[in-house]
Amino acid sequence: MHALPRLLDRLLAGALVVSRWAVYAGGGAILISAFLISFDILSRRFFGLSTWGADELSYYALAVSTSWACAYTLLVKAHIRIDLVTSRVPDMGKVVLHIIALLGLGYMAFATTQAMFHVFQRSWNRGSTSITTLETPMWIPQGLFVAGLVFFTLVTALILLRVLAAVLIERDYAVVNRVTGTVSVLDETEQAIAEAEALQKRNG
Amino acid sequence: MLLTAIFVLLGLLALTIPVAAALFILAMVLEWEFAAAPLSRALGHQIWDTSTNFILVSIPLFILIGELLLRSGIATKVYDALDSWLSWMPGGLMHANIGTATMFSATSGSSVATAATVGTIALPQAPRFGYDERFFAGSIAAGGTLGILLPPSINLIVYGFLAQASIPQLFMAGIIPGLVLSGLFMLAILIMCLIKPEWGGERRKSTMAQRFAKLVHLVPVLVLFGFIMGAIYTGWATPTEAAAIGTVVALIMAFMAGTLSWKMVGEALEGTMRTTCMIMLIMIAANFLNFILASIGLTDSLLSTIATLELSPMQTLFLLIGFYIILGFFIETLSLMIITIPLVAPLITSLGFDPVWFGILLIVLIEMALITPPVGLNLFVVQGVRKRGTLNEVIVGSIPFVLLMFVMVLLLIAFPGLALFLPNLATGG
Amino acid sequence: QSYDLNVVGSLSTSSLYPTYELPFWTETLPAASGGRINVTVQAFDRLGLGGAAVYEMVEQGVYDIGTTIIDYVAGDEPRVEGLDIPAIADPALAREISIAYRPYLERVFDEAFDSVLLGVAPFTAQVVFCKAEINGLDDLAGLRIRGSGRMTMDFIEAVGGTGVSIAFNEVPVALDRGVIDCGITGTLSGFFGGWSEVSTHFYPLPIGGWDPVGFAMNNDSWNSLDEETQTLLREQVAALEDQIWNNAVADNQLGIACNTGGECAVGTAQNLTLVEITEADQRRAVELTRDVVLPRWNERCAGECAETFAATVAPLLDAVLTE
Ligand code: NA
Ligand code: NA
């Protein structure tokens, strides 16, 4: 019916796909780190080889995978919100609170992106390296990290737009609850439960 | 200054702004209001230093281990085995609930995951065998909290990171109190079901042959625990490295159980990254907030305010305990820890208490917060899995366990050795 | 005219900050200025700030003055590493090296961190604790040694050892269980950190260097001071520098005594075997530094940096070898 909400829905669906693949890539990097670290321990123990930087690679993996996972965490509503209030206010109030929550998260996303961009820019300009044997050019992990934060900021803005479109154009509060990017303590536990049940079913 | 900070924080949280963003905005407000220097220019470095910390790499790894074990069906078999060994006692399956929670805790770093896992397996049994549903549900909610006291534990890692206490020592220190608390739970179930037999359901007996046949189901969990703690105890590996080894071992076990697949690993990674990002964002915001608090002198003024009260160390300790119990009713536990530890840890050390010991004491208080209303994650989890009755029943069923946790706190104060014996043994030998 | 200075100091857990920096900023300097200079000071670790970020914060005007271990910024600025090179046992020579390189370093600080380098003082000599029998430098070959910093790791490799990076507080357990054979840290840090309780041998050759800290002041803050105050600040920091150097030597001797059964005023002495630094070993150490470690560093800072080093510090090393 309305072109804008439709477009935003499609963008959100796209963002979910991208963020899911980012999570697989980031999680995969963490998993590979586990193997590299284990290998490092064994080689140091049994072959007397030097530490060569598995630890360093693993904390870059942590940083980069975290920043790229934030959009996904937002899209599946897993950021912790304390809501003794929301359950007690009327629909309109809930919508307002959702928008405030998104604005708050969006501000943090934007400010951290901006601050990290300066760090990245400085490393790029100076050719900074890590003070380890790997001598990693810092702009590489920092650039990947910033890119994840940019994606996070964009997704936050996208969800905010979608919520505003639902309120102003469609006047449909149900949509707000479907897409809103933050979630309560209760919703988080629901997720844990749903997953545990699915497993129970599968494993008998 | 302190009042402004508290007022702003409560306001932000009341607006249901996500915890990470609330802490971040508070930091920005305080900087703008009270700081003489442009402190927020340090933000970029703060973010990068927090995000690239090798200690914190253990967080996704320990979450991943739990996810892999959960999805490989190993937990269900543990319950089955412990059922056959423990259910003959008065209280029946409730002992298996505690036992499974204890075993699963030894590989899981989170309490919510532990409660959800045990709850899904155990809760359908309560009506079938005629248990008091309240008490049965309470045993699962409380048993689940052991996940953060017995190592590995995400919360102990966070504590060690923020209080600059040794994480290997904290892990060692959690073992005996975890087992004692688990024992206290079982003892309480036993005594109460002797007094009120109608609370306990049908007791099932297995033959010794059946029992021994099922012991094999416990092997994977014990092996994994052995690898993780063994690597740390012998000094072969740091906690993060032990987590890496544990992850590899958990993958191998899932493979041997025949449940390893791309789909399963993918789901485990999704769950892992979701939780990791949530925790890391809070860590980043909290670290920046603490930088602002220290820079504008709020940390020092808070400590000197407490000093002017002229309380004895013990009085201060009990004041803190009361503080945590009250806050624990209302605030989500991980946020509670991250906000308070940077303020409380220096205070505790200055009073002459052992930071490792206090870490364990704090975790017991956090466990308590997990099962006290109105905000108690484990209560919600268990009620969610039950899908019948009301949350109030779970709350009532958890009360005896809350009291036992308080007893545990007193025991730790009376006998610090409960926590400190193993870490001292490890460093002394 | 009066001034308010916002200062970030080095590690609160070290002896440097509480013993020298804190009283200097809060008592000595205000008193010397007749109350015209007022200082707010905090240690960077108490602020949750990484040691590597200190000079950048000074550059950006978050603080007027900042102190940190200079090696922390080697990743941003490889040029700073020339100040402190491995295995110089004689404190007088170590100080000569730092003086010779100082003018160039001041220019580096001006360019890289937009700040005035007011002073340089040693943190503490970074020596070797072993749970393995060693009798000299050559015995380090084949051992697993915990170290940190590029030059230190390169030196370990040059003597044939294996460099391992482990966090400071994990070293005692790692030494005890044989995960590593040796570790490098300050003489007293190792004593207080429990390293000596699990070690058997103590080798006071500062393989990790003397770990200098630098006092840097933001250029704008510096220029806002009147000339009289600038002179006062320079003089005062120079006096502090002297005091810290003299004390580093005393601290080093105390550390050796405490670790090897001598007179220890700060605790109960440990009875580690003191491995003497022979003249031959000192020469060999300088040779390894000159022939293996420094060429690698020069690759990281080729051109003017390497040339300046060759003109200022290298002759001092050659003097040791031709003595
Ligand atoms: Na656990
Ligand atoms: Na609670």
Image (cartoon, coloured by chain):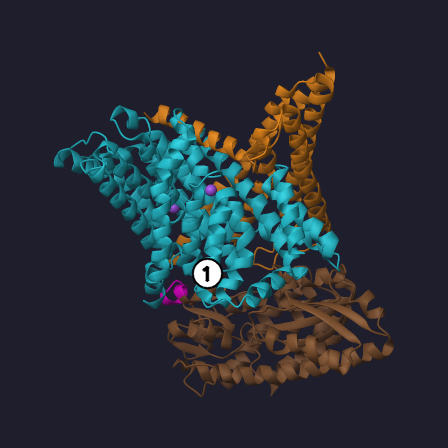
Chain colours: A orange, B cyan, C brown
Q: Is residue C161 left or right of residue C301?
A: left
The picture places residue B425, in percent across and down from the top left corner, at: 32, 64
Residue A37 appearing in the image: no
- Magenta stretch containing residue C178, yes or no? yes
The residues colored magenta run: C173-180
Disc 1 marks a residue whose amino acid type is Leu
Q: Are there few (<14), some (14-19), or many (20+) residues within 10 Å of tag 1?
A: some
Kindly state the secondary structure of the residue where label 1 is placed: helix
Residue A171 appearing in the image: yes
Residue shown at the point (61%, 73%) measured from the top left: C17
Q: Is residue A8 left or right of residue B429?
A: right
- Magenta stretch containing residue A178, yes or no? no
Q: Is residue B62 left or right of residue C177?
A: right
In-front residue for pair A71/B184: B184
Residue shown at the point (73%, 21%) measured from the top left: A168
Q: Which residue is mark 1?
A: B317
Residue shown at the point (51%, 78%) measured from the top left: C205
Q: Chain of mark 1?
A: B
Q: Quadrant of the C terminus of chain C?
A: bottom right
The picture places residue A110, in percent across and down from the top left corner, at: 70, 41
Q: Is residue A169 left or right of residue C167?
A: right
Above or below: residue B299 compared with residue A186:
below
Q: Quadrant of the N terminus of chain C?
A: bottom right
The picture places residue C148, in percent across and down from the top left corner, at: 54, 65
Residue shown at the point (65%, 67%) measured from the top left: C42
Above or below: residue B411 compared with residue B217:
below
